[in-house]
Image (spheres, rainbow, N blue to C red):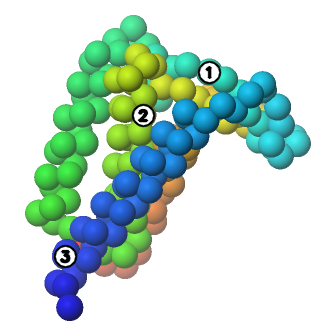
């Protein structure tokens, strides 16, 4: 049987790979014209974001790519030395995959392709990588709020 750390490292890596592949597949798929996916709730759109979250630093794409790459590398190195357990491993993997998806898009196209739009509120367009980043962060925050959450490492 594999040690717990190796199993959780694989969980994190698998979640990251799945998030990255699914995000890139959707970004490269021909989505067609803007339309409602779930009427009144979620729609498809076509948008390019040269900046970071919510268009921040839109005039500094090289800086954003460099920082994202450095943060991904630092996180991957840290996670190989201190693997996480359970939902934390999944959350970290979703965040790594989401960040890698947006970085890949930025390096290949100079901008991140956004294709999802909430229809019931005024909110910037986003993509699956953004959703993975958000869900991963929420999972990590949830785990940190659990009793003993900060000490749950493999």
- Residue 73 falls in image quadrant: top left
Instruction: Pick whichever of labels 1 and 3 is earlier in the sequence.
Output: 3
In the image as oriented, which residue stretches furthest toward the top? 59
Which of 142/5 is in front? 5
In this rendering, is residue 114 above or below 16? Answer: above
Image-based side of 10 in relation to 16, left or right: left
Q: Secondary structure at mark 1?
A: strand
Instruction: Report x, y in % for residue 8.
Output: 28, 73
How packed mark 3 is, by other alpha carbons closer than 10 Å (few <14, some 14-19, many 20 or more), is some
Q: Position of residue 53 (x, y in %)?
A: 47, 29
Number of numbered markers: 3
- Dot 2 or dot 1: first in sequence order is 1
Q: Position of residue 87 (x, y in %)?
A: 41, 71
Name the residue beneath numbered marker 2: 102
Residue 5, numbered label: 3
When the figure is inspected, residue 102 is found, relative to residue 61, above or below; the finding is below
Image quarter where the C terminus lies is bottom left
């Amino acid at each position: 049987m594999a040690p717990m750390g190796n199993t959780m490292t694989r969980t994190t890596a698998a979640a990251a790979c799945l998030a990255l592949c699914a995000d890139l597949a959707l970004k490269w798929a021909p989505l067609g014209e803007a339309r409602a996916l779930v009427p009144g709730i979620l729609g498809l759109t076509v948008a390019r974001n040269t900046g970071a979250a919510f268009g921040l630093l839109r005039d500094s794409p090289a800086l954003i790519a460099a920082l994202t790459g450095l943060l991904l590398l630092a996180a991957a190195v840290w996670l190989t030395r201190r693997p996480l357990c359970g939902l934390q491993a999944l959350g970290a993997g979703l965040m790594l995959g989401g960040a890698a998806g947006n970085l890949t898009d930025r390096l290949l196209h100079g901008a991140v392709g956004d294709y999802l739009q909430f229809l019931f509120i005024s909110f910037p367009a986003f993509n699956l990588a953004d959703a993975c980043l958000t869900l991963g962060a929420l999972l990590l925050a949830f785990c940190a709020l659990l009793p003993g959450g900060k000490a749950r490492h493999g």
